Image: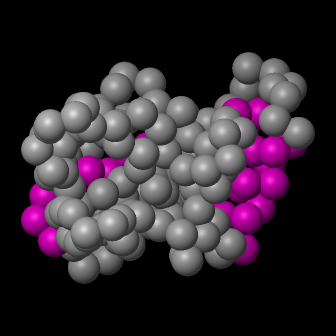
Amino acid sequence: MARLKSDKRRGRLTFLLFDESETNLVGHPRLIPQHIALPTRCPIEIAHEGFLVGEVCAYFLNDPNGLSLPALEGNYVLASAYLYDSDLSGKVMEAVKHGILTHACPNIWSPPGSPTGTGLLVQISLVPNDLPGCPNARILEWSE
């Protein structure tokens, strides 16, 4: 289902990637958005399973663009992404529409000894409400 059908884009998502609120990770560390390196291309997968469904195309630091945002703490990063043209991406879009996949969970790699809350964004997982590491990191808009 993850096999690409064409080089077309299937849909677009805008989501809050992270803010400075407590995470659900062990010890409840807080991320520092301005100290997390954001790659030019960042893959999006479904539910930490490794199946790629899209990629980020833009980041915005503290730029609401008129979006209705949840209550946030400190600085935050918004992201815009597109989904690939595959059967699995189609199912992901249906899950977003029906409120099954609601959050975007950033996977951040921090070298040993680096300060807490810093690192490099390596991928993003679209997850249901019960799995997000960053509770405020939710999908805000979608379109096909």
Image position, residue 75 (x, y; %) = 13, 58
Horizontally, is 107 left or right of 47 in the view?
left
Image position, residue 51 (x, y; %) = 71, 39
In the image, 67 versus 58, the foreground residue is: 58
| Residue 53 in view of the camera | no
Give the image's coloring scheme.
one colour
Horizontally, is 135 left or right of 110 in the view?
right
At horizontal 64% and vertical 55% (from top left) the residue drawn is 47
For the N terminus, give its image quadrant.
top right
Magenta residues, start to end: 73-98
Horizontally, is 100 left or right of 41 in the view?
right
In the image, 58 versus 65, the foreground residue is: 58
| Residue 77 in view of the camera | yes
**Residue 77 counted in the magenta span:** yes
Image position, residue 143 (x, y; %) = 61, 53
Image position, residue 72 (x, y; %) = 22, 73
Q: Is residue 108 above or below residue 137?
A: above
Horizontally, is 123 left or right of 49 in the view?
left
At horizontal 11% and vertical 65% (from top left) the residue drawn is 74
Q: For residue 54, what is the image quadrant?
A: top right
At horizontal 47% and vertical 67% (from top left) the residue drawn is 132
